[in-house]
Structure formats: C-alpha cells, structure tokens
Amino acid sequence: MIFMKRFSNATIFDVAERAGVSTRTVSRVVNQKGEITEETRARVQAVIDELGYRPNILARSLVRQRSNVLGVVTWGLHYYAPSRIVMGIEQRASELGYTLFLQLISHPTAEGAENILHTLADHRVDGIIWAIPEVDDNHKWIRGIPLDNLPPIIFLNARPQTTFDSIAVNNHRGAEIATQYLLQQGCKHIGVIKGPQGWWEAEERFAGWLGTLAAAGRDTSPRFVVEADWSVETGEQAMRRLLEQAPEVDGIFASSDDIALGALTAAMQAGRHISRDLVLVGFDNIPQSAYFQPPLTTIDQPLSRTGRTAVDLLLERIEERQSKKSQTSAPASPKAIQLEPRLVIRASSGGLK
C-alpha cells in the first residue's frame, strides 16, 4: 500500500473533492501560502497523505515559465575533483527541486562550445554551470557570444572576469599555505612539482609557491621546478628529475595528490625517507591520501561546496533575470567567488630531524 501511494496518480481535483474544499485551498496547503484555518489545513493534509498526492512539477514549471532543469557542462568524471564538484551540484539542485541535464566533453580543450549551448537551449534549461577548468584559451568562445541571449551561466575553475560570474577554489592561497608549512617544518630547499602548462589552476599553485619562497628569501631557481600532468606516472618521473637537478631538496610541494603519490614512489626508490629527510605536501585531499605510506599532508579543496555554491548563485541569477525589477534596471555586476582551502596535516610532513 505504501508503494502504491508513493506512485499515486491522484490529482488536485481528487484531493479537493475528498476534502470538500476548492482546488485553490489544496494549492494553498501544498505551497504553504495564503490564509487558511488550521482545521482545514489538517483535513486537506490528511487527504493528501491518504491519496499519496504529489504536485505536478511539470505543470508548475509551465506556469512559472521554467523547466526546473539546470545544464551542467563538465569533463573527466573519473577524476576526483570534477566528480566531487558535480556531486555538490546534484545534491544542492535536488534539495531545491531541480534536475540536471549533463553534457560531457572529452577534454577541457575540446571544441564544440557552440553546439553544446544550442543543445542546452533546445532542452530549455533554466541556467548553465560551465564546470570546465580554464586551460590555455579554451574559454575564448565567450568573447564571440552575447551572454544575454543565453540562460544565465556560472563558470567554475576560471580566472575572475568582468563579464561573467565565476567560482573557484583559491589555488594561490592553498599553495601559499602548503609552502609556508614546509618552511615551518624546517625545510631549507623546497622544490615544486607543477601541474601541466596552460592550466590556470596549475599556474596559480605555482605562483603561490614562488611568491612565498621569494618573500622568505629562498632559492626559486629553475632547478627546483619540474612539471607533471596531474597523474601518478608523471609525478614519479618529475620527482626523479627533481632529485637529479637538486639533490639537496628537502621539501616538496606537489600540485596534486596523484602527483604526490608518484613522488612518494620515486623518493623511496631513491632511498629518501619521507618525513625524516624529505617533507612532502600535496593538493586535493583525495580519500586515498590518508592511506598513502606515509599518509599525505595535503591541501583540502572544498569541491562539493564549490558545486553547491554554483547552484545557489545560478538560481539567484535566474530569479534576477525573470523578475520585473531586473527588466527595468541594470544587470547585477558579475561575482568572482573564491572558496578557501585548508591544510590537512599527516605523517608525510613529520619534520626534519
């Protein structure tokens, strides 16, 4: 019986007839609006529960001129960061009564933005979250399309602009925290394993490392800098190069936890003891990082909160777009929201002895 009620086909007219009230009264109970006696409210609610009535979401959306669907453009859901962001988007959207229309691309630099936008527009999405990180000039399409002709768009993991809303983790600050911690642990020669060239997030993390060491008067020459491609394999290769270029290195900031795992492997193969004579800090706080040997000190990104914040800001823009006030006043200035990371301390940074 409970199963049948959950999927009931009861209509608002059925509820009104059984409760002996008008459909408007039922609507007031459902929406918790309008003045109505507690006795009537209780009677109508009892019938709603008995019949398993659920409001027709499609009908509601037609009345409100909304689809209650948000478009999400993303990539790489097999990677930790993109998947956590989308999880946050889905959770918040579901809480607010929205569903997602997901568009996946093969790589952040893949072409086809215009076709994707056409597809999203054809599906009448209320707004769009562009969860594609900024790499090289992959956001150049923005300059050729009047955004006012599209549903509201929120961009994730992109440098702040004056023409659109953006949300990102403060990568620069995260790298500063990591590098400052390495200094506090007594490291004298701190190297960095950068992320791939052209990625805005990677460049921000490198800049945080560079600025912190320069302010402390430490060596930032190129021999302390190597590059990897976000992967364990390239992290291992980069660590080998770094140990060859700067054998005196005693602290490492790895631009991702996967890179850090590769660095751990290379360091151990080279006979370096992590936490005793080589301190390592990563970036991401993937679940596996707590189980590395030794467990990895890392920078935690609020990835799920990034997705949730994107939904909140997008719905704010949708409301503004549809309100009469926004039609007669200047549009709101774009927001550039940065979410702050935090340091998670584990055994890989036990300090030099």
Image: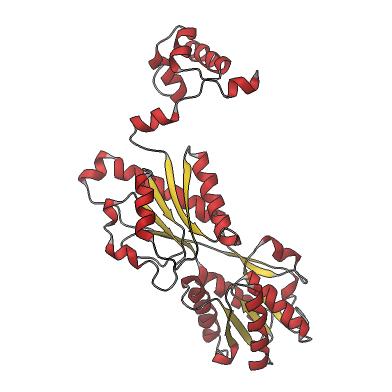
Q: Quadrant of residue 5?
A: top right
Q: Position of residue 100 (x, y in %)?
A: 48, 45
In which quadrant of the rendered image does the N terminus lie? top right
Rendered-image quadrant of the C terminus: bottom right
Residue 287 makes an appearance in the image:
yes
Q: Is residue 214 left or right of residue 181?
A: left
Q: How many marks?
A: 0
Q: Is residue 88 left or right of residue 285?
A: left
Which residue is found at the position 57% from the left and 18% from the top? 49
Q: Nearer the viewer, residue 241 or 335?
A: 241
- Which residue lies at the image location 55% right of the left edge and 79% below the top edge? 209
Residue 28 picture location, percent across and down: 42, 20
Q: Is residue 180 left or right of residue 29?
A: right
Tell me if residue 37 can be seen.
no
Pick the residue in front: 186 or 42.
42
Indicate left or right for 22 with 272 as reference.
left
The colour scheme of the drawn protein is: secondary structure
In the image, residue 79 above or below residue 119: below
Image position, residue 43 (x, y; %): 52, 11
Query: From this viewpoint, which residue is outermost toward the left?
Result: 328
Compared with 228, 100 (above or below) is above
The location of residue 163, given as percent across then percent down, is: 31, 61
Which residue is drawn at the image coordinates 69% and 86% (left, top)?
250
Q: Nearer the viewer, residue 102 or 185?
A: 102
For residue 348, above or below residue 64? below
* Image point (59%, 88%), residue name: 224
